[in-house]
Image (cartoon, grey):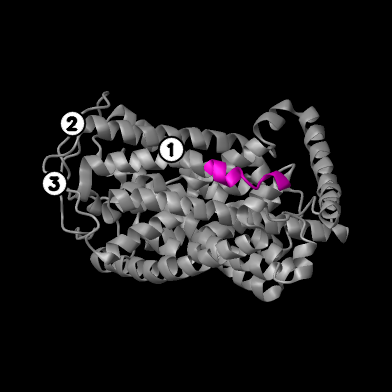
C-alpha cells in the first residue's frame, strides 16, 4: 500500500510539471512551427539525441590511440565495461534528480524560469558541503571538457589546411565557439543534437571503411600493452569516453517528462558502441603501434575527399559539443551574478562571454590532444560522474525512512536496495583505485612527458616536420599515401 501511495504521489507532482511544460511548448509552437520543429525540444527522442551526440565527440578520433596502448582485447572489454558503468551512474543521477524535484515541488517551488543543476540536487538532498564538492568537480570537468573541444578543432582542421599552425587555429575556433552564448538552454539543441549524431556516425564509419580498404601498413605491429603507464592512460581515456553524463541533470530538466530518462543513457551508449568499437578496432588493425605517436586517427589516413568531409563534420560537431559542455557553466555564472532569470537573450549572452576566455587560454597552454583526455578522465571524470553520484545515492537513502518514502523504488532485477547499494559501492571502489589511482598516476606521467617534450604553449603539437610533404586531396576512399614517420614515443621536435 505504501509503495502504491508513493507512486501516485510521484505521478501527481511530476505530472503537474509535465502539463506545464507541454502547455508552454504548444503555445510557442502555435506562434512558430519552425521554432517548434527545430528549436524547442523536450521529448524522449531529443534527450536520446543529446546524450548520444554529446557522448561520442572527439574521443572517436583518440580511441584508436587508446587501443594501441591497451591492445585489442582490453580496448574492447573496457569499452563494454565502462559503458555499463556510465549508464548505471547516469541512471543514479536521474533518480536523484526526480527525488530532489519532487521534494521541492511538494514545497511549492516553481522551476519554470530556473534550470536545475547537479550541484543544486546535491544541496537539496545532502547539504552545502556536498554542493560545494559537486560544484567544484562538475565545473572543472566541464571547463576542461570545453578546452578539449577547442584543442580537437585545431587538431582536425590542420589536416585540411596546414598553412596555419594549430595554435592559430585555436584562436580562430575559440572565437567561433564563443557564439554558443546565444543558445539559451538544452531545449534549443534539438536540431543540433540530431545533426551532431549524423556527423559522428559518418565519421565513425569513414574511419572503419577507410582503414579496412587501406589495409595494414607494411610491417605493422600490435604489441600493446607494453607498459603499465600506457595501459592505464588508455583505460582512463575510455573512462572519459563514457563519462559524458555530467550534463545529465540539465538534459533531464529540458525534458517534458524527465521521469522517462532512466534508460535513455543506456540506449544511447549502446548506439555509441556501434560507432566506437568498429572504428577503433579497424584503425588499430590497420596501423598498429604507429598510433602511439599519432593520437588523432585522421593523421594516419591518406587525404581524400571523404576524409576532408569527415574532418569538416567533426569540426561542426565539436562546436555543438562545446556548447553542451559550456552551457552548464553559463548557467552557473548567470546564477552567480544574478542574471539567470533575465529574459533578454542579448543581456544573458553578453554576461556569458567571460566564461569562454579561460577556456580559450587553457586550450592554448595545453594543446595535448589525446593525453589531456586521459588526465581529465582520471582526475575529474572519475569523481564527477562516477564516485560522487554513487556516494550521493547511498547517503541520500541511507535511512529506512528515506528508502520507504523514495519517489522511485529500485526494481527487483537490480536486487532492490541491497543490490543497488552493492553496485554503487563497487563503482566507488573500482573507480577510486583503478580510475583515479592507477589512471591518475599514468595519465599525469604521460601528461608531464608531453610538457617536457613539447613545452607549454607549443605552437603545433605532433605536427610533422616541415620537410614532410602532404599528399594532395584525391577523390577515392582507398587512396594510398606514404606512411607517416614512425618516431619514438611522443618525441617530436618543438615548434
Q: Toward the viewer: 370 or 93?
A: 93
Residue 264: % across, % down: 61, 43
**Is 146 situated above or below 431?**
above
Q: Main secondary structure of the magenta part?
A: helix
How much space separates mark 2 and mark 3, taking CA atoms?
20 Å
Looking at the image, is mark 1 or mark 3 nearer the viewer?
A: 1
Residue 245: % across, % down: 56, 53
Looking at the image, is mark 1 or mark 2 nearer the viewer?
A: 1
**Is 401 situated above or below 212?**
below
Q: Would you name the residue on which mark 1 appears?
A: 274
Q: Earlier in the sequence, mark 1 or mark 3?
A: 1
Hey, which residue is sitting farthest bottom in the picture? 129
At numbered mark 2, what does the secondary structure look like: helix, strand or loop?
loop
Q: Would you name the residue on which mark 3 appears?
A: 467
How much space separates mark 1 and mark 3, taking CA atoms?
39 Å
At numbered mark 3, what does the secondary structure look like: helix, strand or loop?
loop
Residue 27 figure quarter: top right
Q: Which residue is drawn at the image coordinates 17% and 50% (left, top)?
A: 465
Q: Is residue 133 left or right of residue 367?
A: right
How much space separates mark 1 and mark 2, taking CA atoms?
27 Å
Kindly indicate whether the residue at mark 3 contacts the one at mark 2 (C-beta within 8 angstroms): no
At numbered mark 1, what does the secondary structure look like: helix, strand or loop?
helix
Hey, which residue is sitting farthest top in the picture? 475
Q: Residues within 10 Å of mark 2 (few under 14, many from 20)?
A: some
Residue 335 figure quarter: bottom right
Q: Would you name the residue on which mark 2 appears?
A: 480
**Is 398 situated above or below 293?**
below
Q: Earlier in the sequence, mark 1 or mark 2?
A: 1
Hey, which residue is sitting farthest left in the picture? 219
Bounds of the magenta span? 259-268
Q: Toward the viewer: 78 or 344?
A: 78
Amino acid at each position: 500500500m505504501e509503495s502504491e501511495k508513493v507512486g501516485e504521489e510521484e505521478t501527481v507532482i511530476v505530472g503537474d510539471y509535465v502539463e506545464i511544460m507541454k502547455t508552454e511548448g504548444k503555445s510557442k509552437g502555435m506562434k512558430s512551427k519552425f521554432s517548434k520543429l527545430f528549436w524547442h525540444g523536450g521529448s524522449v527522442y531529443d534527450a536520446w539525441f543529446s546524450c548520444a551526440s554529446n557522448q561520442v565527440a572527439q574521443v572517436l578520433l583518440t580511441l584508436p590511440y587508446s587501443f594501441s596502448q591497451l591492445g585489442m582485447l582490453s580496448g574492447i572489454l573496457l569499452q563494454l565495461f565502462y559503458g555499463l558503468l556510465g549508464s548505471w551512474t547516469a541512471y543514479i543521477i536521474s533518480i536523484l534528480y526526480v527525488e530532489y524535484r519532487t521534494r521541492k515541488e511538494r514545497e511549492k517551488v516553481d522551476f519554470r524560469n530556473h534550470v536545475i543543476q547537479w550541484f543544486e540536487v546535491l544541496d537539496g538532498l545532502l547539504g552545502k558541503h556536498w554542493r560545494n564538492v559537486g560544484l567544484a568537480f562538475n565545473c572543472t570537468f566541464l571547463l576542461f571538457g570545453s578546452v578539449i573541444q577547442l584543442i580537437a578543432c585545431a587538431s582536425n582542421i590542420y589536416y585540411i589546411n596546414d598553412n596555419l599552425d594549430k595554435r592559430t587555429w585555436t584562436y580562430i575556433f575559440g572565437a567561433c565557439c564563443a557564439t554558443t552564448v546565444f543558445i539559451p538552454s538544452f531545449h534549443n539543441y534539438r536540431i543540433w543534437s540530431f545533426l551532431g549524431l549524423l556527423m559522428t556516425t559518418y565519421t565513425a564509419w569513414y574511419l572503419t571503411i577507410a582503414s579496412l580498404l587501406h589495409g595494414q601498413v607494411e610491417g605493422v605491429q600490435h604489441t600493446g600493452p607494453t607498459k603499465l603507464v600506457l595501459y592505464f592512460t588508455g583505460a582512463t581515456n575510455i573512462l572519459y569516453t563514457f563519462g559524458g553524463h555530467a550534463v545529465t541533470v540539465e538534459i533531464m530538466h529540458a525534458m517534458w517528462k524527465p521521469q522517462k530518462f532512466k534508460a535513455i543513457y543506456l540506449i544511447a551508449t549502446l548506439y555509441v558502441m556501434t560507432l566506437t568499437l568498429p572504428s577503433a578496432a579497424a584503425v588499430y588493425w590497420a596501423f598498429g603501434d604507429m598510433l602511439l605517436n599519432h593520437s588523432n586517427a585522421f593523421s594516419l589516413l591518406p587525404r581524400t575527399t571523404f576524409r576532408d568531409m569527415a574532418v569538416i563534420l567533426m569540426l561542426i560537431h565539436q562546436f555543438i559539443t562545446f556548447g553542451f559542455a559550456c552551457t552548464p557553466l553559463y548557467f552557473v555564472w548567470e546564477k552567480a551574478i544574478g542574471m539567470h532569470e533575465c529574459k533578454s537573450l542579448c543581456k544573458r549572452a553578453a554576461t556569458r562571454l567571460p566564461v569562454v576566455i579561460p577556456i580559450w587560454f587553457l586550450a592554448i597552454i595545453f594543446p595535448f590532444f589525446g593525453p589531456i583526455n586521459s588526465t581529465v578522465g582520471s582526475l575529474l571524470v572519475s569523481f564527477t560522474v562516477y564516485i560522487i553520484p554513487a556516494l550521493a545515492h547511498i547517503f541520500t537513502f541511507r535511512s529506512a525512512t528515506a528508502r520507504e518514502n523514495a519517489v522511485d523504488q529500485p526494481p527487483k532485477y537490480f536486487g532492490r536496495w541491497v543490490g543497488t547499494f552493492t553496485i554503487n559501492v563497487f563503482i566507488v571502489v573500482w573507480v577510486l583505485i583503478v580510475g583515479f589511482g592507477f589512471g591518475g598516476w599514468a595519465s599525469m606521467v604521460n601528461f608531464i612527458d608531453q610538457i617536457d617534450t613539447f613545452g607549454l604553449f607549443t605552437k603545433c603539437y605532433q605536427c610533422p616536420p616541415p620537410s614532410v610533404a602532404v599528399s594532395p586531396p584525391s577523390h577515392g576512399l582507398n587512396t594510398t599515401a606514404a606512411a607517416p614517420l614512425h618516431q619514438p614515443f611522443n618525441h617530436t621536435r618543438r615548434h
